[in-house]
Image (cartoon, grey):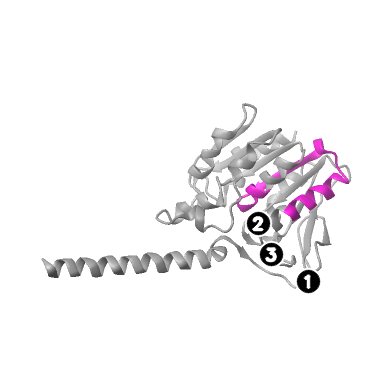
Amino acid sequence: MTFNKKKIYRWVKRIAILYVTVGIGLFVFQQKFILHPTKLAHNYTFKFDSKFEEINIPFNDTDTLNLIKFLPPDTIRKGVVIYYHGNMNNVEHYAGFTKPFTSKGYEVWMEDYPSFGKSTGKITEQKLYQQAMQVKKMANEKFSNDSIILYGKSLGTGIAAYVARNTKAKMLILETPYYSIPALFNCYAPIYPTTAMATFKIPTYEYIQNVKYQITIFHGTSDGVIPYSSSLKLKAFLKPTDTYITIPNADHININKTKLYLTKIDSLLK
């Protein structure tokens, strides 16, 4: 009996040590799990299939925000889509996603977050919000609110929702959104107190509750990065005029290539 108690104690101790060790690792390195930027030299030359303009915006004494404006082929502009991209690489990775908008006469403004591409500075949640708001303010210098579409993809959905809560625009479109960063964290580490551990919060569910204009959400049922269930919980906070579009069998990468997505985007842009 004594032997068994000692053996059980040793196993409990080992499990506890493993739990704490993994938990510390998740806490310390969580930003590396969430963010996967690819930096570019300041003199790097972008090459895109469509016309574009590059702007470097001084944000403070140390940070510079790099913004690419993807331009439609015609000189007549219907408006602008401010596109807050995902957690991978930089604007080069997302440039191909702009064609459904530029082909319909919209400019697409896409910023790189701090430490992504040519943007410099240390990334923080507050800085993501501040820079996103700065881009929206710049858009308002050229376009009226009813010509501005806020678009968030993956990580960018929470950022776009924040801007939408605090400013006027024509509509908010969210592609593969998450409920919040702690909730997403919990999908991968359910045995840990992710709400307390997460240094990034980005509560998308909170922000969309205060958006006064149209919201459209796209999510695929086979998304292996942001589970479909994560955005499904957002439906409870949508207005009767908002739309949640489920795309069967679409994953995190191919959702914007599906016929249903392209048809709906075309309808929204009309």
Query: Percent x, y for residue 23?
Result: 44, 64
- Asked which quadrant contains residue 214, the reply is top right
Mark 1 or 2: the one toward you: 2
Residue 106 visible in the picture? yes
173 with respect to 10 (left or right): right
The residue depicted at 56 percent of the width and 66 percent of the height is 32
What number is the disc on residue 42?
1
Q: Describe the element under mark 2 as helix, strand or loop.
A: helix
Distance between the alpha carbons at the discs numbered 1 and 3: 12 Å
232 with respect to 94 (left or right): left
Distance between the alpha carbons at the discs numbered 1 and 2: 24 Å
Distance between the alpha carbons at the discs numbered 3 and 2: 14 Å
Q: Describe the element under mark 1 as helix, strand or loop.
A: loop
Q: Residue tagged by mark 2?
A: 125
Query: Percent x, y for residue 37?
Result: 64, 65
> Vertical placement of 88 versus 169: above or below?
below
- Asked which quadrant contains residue 78, the reply is top right
Is most of the magenta stretch helix, strand or loop? helix
In depth, the one of 51 and 13 nearer the eye is: 13
First in sequence, mark 1 or 2: give its number: 1
**In which quadrant of the rendered image does the C terminus lie?**
top right
Hey, what amino acid is under mark 2? Glu
Tell me if mark 1 has few (under 14), some (14-19) or many (20+) residues whose alpha carbon lies within 10 angstroms of its own. few
Q: Which region is colored magenta?
A: 130-159
Labels in figure, total: 3
The residue depicted at 55 percent of the width and 52 percent of the height is 181
Contact (Cβ within 8 Å) of mark 3 with mark 2: no
Mark 3 or 2: the one toward you: 2
Q: Residue tagged by mark 3?
A: 116
Q: Residue furthest top?
A: 240
Hey, what amino acid is under mark 1? His
Q: Residue furthest front?
A: 2
